[in-house]
Image (tube, rainbow, N blue to C red):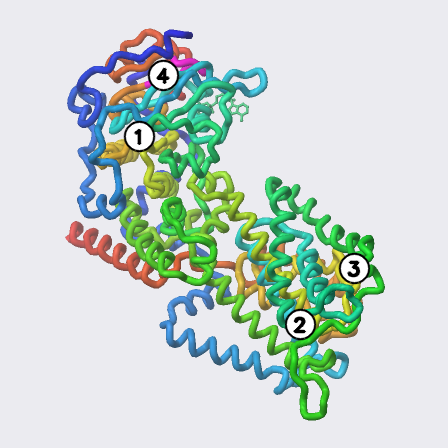
């Protein structure tokens, strides 16, 4: 009677996989999993970094941060964008792009939502700063520095408003819809009289303070203080993004990126966390926009085109989707190359287009692949792992003896 | 099909250590040597003290149609606290569809699913999970780029209360939850026997470890009912027996289990009661040794090619 016949193992791949599993069990601790794990150059780096004691990590970080702050003063000849472009201003531009990339990385990298219209939030931030500080605007005026938190809040609200109807879509459909976001803001800026279309807003505000000669410290042409301000904000945002990454929020995002249905089934409120990703990403975008508007001092509807939006995505992809440090490099690189190599600036879209294609073909995980730690007490956790495998292998050897 | 909704008389000895009452068709490895401490750490709040044998889940007149196809046709059964209920049937009988309806993936065309008397229909999937229904997938669906431990912690997060702001600022509750989740996550991995791979990415795990990780992840959500969709698919006989021993341990630990499994012999050995589906209809619902003799079940399975029993 067939119903009580012995089970026949399945043919093909699954059976052999199961056999491999058995082998590895006999082999003892961690052999199968670790052997298949390939490490690239960056993988080796990141492993070295993770293995370092905390104090040493801090030391390195402080050195890197100090160098970053010193860059506009040192103006190193190889790195410098001069004479073609003012180096401190170039650094500011790089910092803004880095900030944008870190924000967009929350949306694309962590939550896996391909947002091609991120420029919309950047624009919202710029307009928030411009309309509340420029003498051309009919609205109440507030000090420039207040517009930065306000830009975050307004952009987050816009993020939620745009996210709630669209985040029900997935993948390519979502990407297509987000393409419209940037256009929506641009067209609104053209249609709404208070937003002054192409005329725009002159003399956007700046942080207070004047030098001895009566020239404002944060003059439009003085890149260094703007760069320092943006770099400081960037560092704070990186810390906060790191906190989110190593929490249930970051884990939920990665889980959604990996398999949205499974995440939902495991109790992750996927819609809520997708809206949060959108909102937080938008907040960072809005803040970048406010900084940009302040430095440039002029905002109109010509500044926020789809192509720039795609450049933001390129920054995230270049850096390695899901890696916040990578995003900083990606963003800085995208801003730096056309400023440094002015001869090729005209072809920047062509160059980044080709670079993106090559990366997607040869290093689909970006230049610096992601391997974020998703546990706040990662070190503690992996200590436990090591203990367990040590115990396991001890048992195995005991049995063999 | 009215007969299906009427309750099948319950043999007295059904619930807890029922596997002594009828000889398993094959020898089952006795309970894995998982020590109490591990089980305790893995699931401190499990249902172990709760009255065993009362109705935990009621599936009432569940019907699911996909266009013209009736995947489930007026199916009713109950799952009692503390039992392992088998759900069997030939390919395409509607077993997975039944899981999907229970866990909120599909909206039933009609009928209800009640967990402890509370209606689950219309609830969001993640709310159903938090209400106490966890599942694994027939085709493994882990979070490939996360480590085994992180996968389990995602399941544990279902019970965590840290808000986005709490995580952003690393408030005390976040720190507490993170610390305890490492302990519990490791304990769960130990419980299913893959603790030594805790730091490996889920996609790099061997097939067998992946299946076990799915179970650990589902257990992490602290379910009242654990639904396993062919957890032993693709295993050889020895591995299947190991897994069935694990499932018994899970049950003995205070969980209720709903098990889909193609292999009749294994199902007979491990379950306390069996519901049989064929073409979306329930054709039998009884203790294993009665199911084995049931002519309807026999013919349902005889109508299938040999391979499908494996
Ligand atoms: N989303 C869907 N859309 C349309 N038809 C579906 C869908 N899901 C399942 N079905 C159909 O419903 C029937 C039952 O499928 P189900 O997956 O529940 O079977 P099963 O008992 O789990 O089979 P197996 O043993 O092969 O896993 C099948 O005929 C299947 O083709
Ligand atoms: Mg199925």
Indicate left or right for B11 with B226 as reference. left
Disc 1 designates what residue? B257
Mark 2 residue element: helix
Disc 3 designates what residue? A195
Task: Give the residue furthest to the front.
Answer: A140
Label 4 resides on the chain identified as B
Q: CA distance from mark 4 to mark 1?
A: 16 Å
User: Which of marks 1 and 4 precedes in the sequence?
Assistant: 1
Badge 4 residue CB within 8 Å of ligand 1 = no
Q: CA distance from mark 4 to mark 3?
A: 67 Å
User: Which of marks 3 and 2 precedes in the sequence?
Assistant: 2
Magenta stretch encompasses residue B278: yes
Disc 4 designates what residue? B276
When asked about the image quadrant of residue B166, the answer is bottom left
The total number of labels drawn is 4
Asked whether the viewer can see residue B135, the reply is yes
Badge 1 residue CB within 8 Å of ligand 2 = no
Asked if badges 2 and 4 are on one and the same chain, I answer no
Disc 2 designates what residue? A144
Q: Position of residue A258 (x, y in %)?
A: 50, 46
Which of the two marks, 1 or 3, is nearer to us in this view?
3
Task: Give the residue furthest to the bottom.
Answer: A212
Label 3 resides on the chain identified as A
């Amino acid at each position: 009677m067939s119903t009580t016949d012995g089970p026949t193992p399945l043919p093909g791949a699954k059976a052999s996989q199961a056999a491999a599993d058995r082998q590895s069990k006999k082999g003892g601790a961690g052999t199968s999993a670790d052997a298949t794990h390939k490490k690239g150059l960056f993988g080796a780096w990141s492993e070295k970094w993770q293995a370092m004691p905390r104090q040493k990590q801090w030391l390195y970080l402080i050195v890197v941060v100090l160098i970053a702050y010193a860059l506009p003063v040192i103006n190193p000849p190889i790195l410098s964008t001069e004479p073609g472009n003012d180096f401190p201003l170039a650094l500011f531009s790089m910092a803004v792009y880095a900030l944008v990339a870190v924000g967009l990385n929350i949306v694309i990298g962590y939550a896996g939502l391909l947002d091609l219209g991120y420029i919309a939030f950047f624009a919202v931030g710029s307009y928030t700063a411009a309309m509340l500080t420029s003498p051309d605007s009919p609205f109440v005026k507030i000090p420039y520095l207040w517009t930065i938190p306000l830009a975050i809040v307004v952009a987050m609200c816009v993020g939620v408003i745009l996210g709630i109807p669209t985040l029900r879509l997935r993948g390519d459909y979502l990407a297509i819809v987000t393409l419209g976001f940037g256009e929506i803001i641009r067209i609104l800026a053209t249609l709404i009289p208070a937003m002054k279309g192409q005329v725009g807003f002159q003399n956007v505000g700046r942080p207070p303070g004047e030098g001895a000669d009566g020239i404002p410290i944060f003059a439009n042409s003085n890149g260094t203080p703007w760069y320092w301000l943006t770099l400081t904000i960037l560092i704070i945002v990186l810390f906060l993004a790191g906190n989110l990454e190593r929490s249930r929020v970051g884990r939920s995002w990665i889980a959604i990126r990996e398999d949205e249905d499974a995440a939902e089934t495991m109790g992750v409120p996927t819609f809520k966390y997708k809206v949060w990703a959108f909102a937080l990403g938008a907040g960072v975008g809005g803040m970048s926009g406010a900084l940009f508007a302040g430095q440039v001092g002029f905002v109109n509807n010509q500044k926020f085109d789809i192509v720039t939006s795609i450049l933001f995505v390129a920054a995230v992809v270049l850096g390695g989707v899901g890696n916040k440090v990578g995003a900083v490099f990606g963003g800085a690189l995208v801003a730096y190359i056309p400023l440094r190599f002015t001869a090729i600036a005209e072809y920047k879209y062509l160059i980044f287009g080709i670079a993106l294609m090559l990366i997607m073909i040869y290093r689909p995980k970006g230049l610096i692949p992601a391997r974020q730690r998703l546990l706040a007490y990662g070190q503690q956790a992996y200590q436990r792992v090591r203990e367990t495998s040590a115990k396991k292998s001890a048992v195995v050897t005991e049995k063999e003896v | 099909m009215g007969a299906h909704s009427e309750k099948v008389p319950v043999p007295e000895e059904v619930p807890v250590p029922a596997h002594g009452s009828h000889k398993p068709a094959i020898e089952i490895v006795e309970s894995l040597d998982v020590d109490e401490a591990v089980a305790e750490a893995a699931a401190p709040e499990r249902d172990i003290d709760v009255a065993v044998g009362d109705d935990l889940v009621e599936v009432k007149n569940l019907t699911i149609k996909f266009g013209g196809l009736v995947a489930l046709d007026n199916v009713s059964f109950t799952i009692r606290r503390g039992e392992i209920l088998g759900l069997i049937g030939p390919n395409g009988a509607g077993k997975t569809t039944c899981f999907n309806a229970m866990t909120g993936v599909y909206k039933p065309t009609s009928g209800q699913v009640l967990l402890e008397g509370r209606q689950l229909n219309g609830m969001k999937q993640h709310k159903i999970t938090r209400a106490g229904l966890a599942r694994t997938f027939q085709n493994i669906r882990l979070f490939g780029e996360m480590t085994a431990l992180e996968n389990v912690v995602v399941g544990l997060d279902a019970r965590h209360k840290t808000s986005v702001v709490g995580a952003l600022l690393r408030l005390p509750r976040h720190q507490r939850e993170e610390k305890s989740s490492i302990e519990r996550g490791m304990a769960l991995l130990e419980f299913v026997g893959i603790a030594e791979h805790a730091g490996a990415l889920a996609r790099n795990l061997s097939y067998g470890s992946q299946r076990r990780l799915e179970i650990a992840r589902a257990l992490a959500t602290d379910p009242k009912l654990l639904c396993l969709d062919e957890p032993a698919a693709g295993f050889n006989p020895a591995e299947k027996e190991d897994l069935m021993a694990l499932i018994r341990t899970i049950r003995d630990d205070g969980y209720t289990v709903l098990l889909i499994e193609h292999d009749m012999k294994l199902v007979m050995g491990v379950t306390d009661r069996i519901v049989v589906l064929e073409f979306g209809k329930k054709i039998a619902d009884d203790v294993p040794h009665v199911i084995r003799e049931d002519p309807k079940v026999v013919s349902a399975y005889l109508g299938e090619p040999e391979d499908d029993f494996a």
